[in-house]
């Protein structure tokens, strides 16, 4: 698998974190959907155990970020 894809994922996750910090829940949620779709595509084409482990780490992180977005929406 292309390491560049994981780099793109990392940048996308950082963007979500920045949007949450800026209290921009709508944009953070939209970006989360985009990154989740990219992650699903990577999962569909993963062949190595190392790739699956890396993808699972991102899945857990995205779930945590989704919970933060939900909390952020509850504060508004």
Image (tube, rainbow, N blue to C red):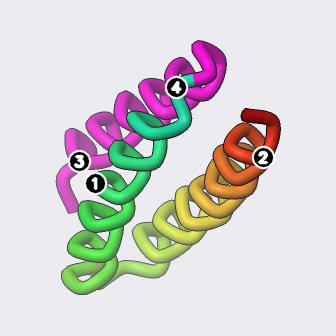
Number of the front mark, 1 or 2: 2
Residue 6 location (% of width, % of height): 34, 46
Separation (CA) of disc 1 from disc 2:
22 Å
Q: Position of residue 75 (x, y in %)?
A: 81, 36
Q: CA distance from mark 2 to mark 3?
A: 33 Å
SS for callout 3: helix
Residue 7: mark in rendering: none
Q: Residues within 10 Å of mark 4 (few under 14, many from 20)?
A: some
**Residue 64 to residue 15: above or below:** below
Asked if labels 4 and 1 touch by Cβ distance under 8 angstroms, the answer is no
Magenta span: predominant SS is: helix
- Mark 1, Cα crowd under 10 Å, few <14 / some 14-19 / many 20+, is few
The residue that mark 4 highlights is 24
Q: Disc 3 designates what residue?
A: 5
Q: Earlier in the sequence, mark 1 or mark 2?
A: 1
Q: Residue at x 38, y 63 (%)?
A: 36
In the image, residue 1 lies at what x, y percent? 22, 62
Q: CA distance from mark 4 to mark 3?
A: 25 Å
């Amino acid at each position: 698998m292309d390491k560049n894809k994981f780099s793109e994922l990392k940048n996308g996750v950082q963007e979500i974190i920045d949007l949450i910090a800026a209290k921009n829940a709508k944009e953070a949620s939209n970006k989360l959907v985009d990154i989740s779709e990219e992650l699903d595509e990577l999962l569909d084409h993963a062949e190595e155990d190392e790739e699956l482990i890396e993808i699972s780490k991102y899945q857990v992180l995205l779930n945590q970020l989704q919970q933060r977005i939900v909390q952020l929406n509850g504060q508004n």
